[in-house]
Image (tube, rainbow, N blue to C red):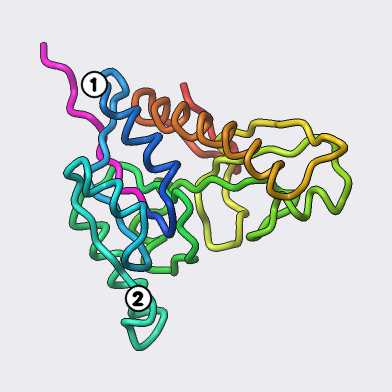
Amino acid sequence: MTDPAPARLVVLVSGSGSNLQALLDASADPAYGARVVAVGADRDAIAGLDRAAAVGVPTFVASLKSYATRDDWDAALTAQVAEHKPDLVVSAGFLKLVGERFLAEFGGRYVNTHNALLPAFPGIHGPRDALAYGVKIAGATLFFVDAGVDTGPIIAQVGVPVLDDDTEAVLTERIKVAERAQLVDYIGRLVREGWTIQDRKVRIP
């Protein structure tokens, strides 16, 4: 009996691609159960694309400014991702909100990671907002994307301590370490074990 083919991941990035690199490293082990089949970006000339190219993973760019409307961009991004027949699409620092067409195609299998413990501190300044509020525990949330901003069903969360002398930069880096480990762990679990979503509750057998 042959082992099942690894699940197909398309990873979307906007910057350095450190989370992407963690997934590339993990998927080099056949036991992980997934491989990155393509990397997409919303801009050219970023390190995330270089990381993919360095290991022979196909890349594509869907730049918002290249399209007349946001709907046109969403349709193009959807088509580019669909070409690679992903089992899961992973937002690894992708800084664009996808639209209705993308969610119609990939809803329930589009995963994002956020550097706060949702539903607290959504948006792009999670660690800064957590510090300003004075919380004692921050962290990261992995979730399935829906039409809201950081509002989708939660897959997993990990907490990190907030120390008295933390700056935004220091706290952000501490969260990133935990966030990256959680991302790799749970993407592997999702593809190897499957999942269900019912009443906003994500269950992995």
CB-based contact (under 8 Å), mark 2 and mark 1: no
**Image: 150 above or below 45:** above
Instruction: Inspect the image, locate mark 1, and give the three-letter code of the amino acid beneath it.
Output: Pro
**Image: 139 above or below 149:** above
Q: Residue at x 39, y 85 (%)?
A: 69
Q: Position of residue 17 (x, y in %)?
A: 41, 48
Q: Specify whether 170 is left or right of 163.
A: left
Q: Residue at x 61, y 55 (%)?
A: 150
Which residue ends up furthest to the top in the rendered image? 1
Q: Residue at x 30, y 42 (%)?
A: 9
**Image: 184 above or below 119:** above
Of marks 2 and 1, which one's residue comes earlier in the chain? 1
Q: Position of residue 18 (x, y in %)?
A: 44, 43
* Helix, strand or loop under label 2: helix
Label ID, residue 190: none
**Image: 175 above or below 17:** above
Q: Specify whether 173 is left or right of 160.
A: left
Instruction: Inspect the image, locate mark 2, and give the three-letter code of the amino acid beneath it.
Output: Trp
Query: Quick check: is 9 in the magenta stretch?
Result: yes
Q: Residue at x 44, y 51 (%)?
A: 91
Task: Please name the residue that numbered disc 1 is placed on.
Answer: 30
Q: CA distance from mark 2 to mark 1?
A: 35 Å
| Quarter in which the N terminus is drawn | top left
Q: Specify whether 186 is left or right of 89.
A: right
Q: Position of residue 188 (x, y in %)?
A: 39, 27
Q: Position of residue 157 (x, y in %)?
A: 63, 34
Task: Please name the residue that numbered disc 2 is placed on.
Answer: 73
Instruction: Determine which quarter of the picture holds residue 199.
Output: top right
Query: Quick check: is 184 in the magenta stretch?
Result: no
Bounds of the magenta span?
1-11
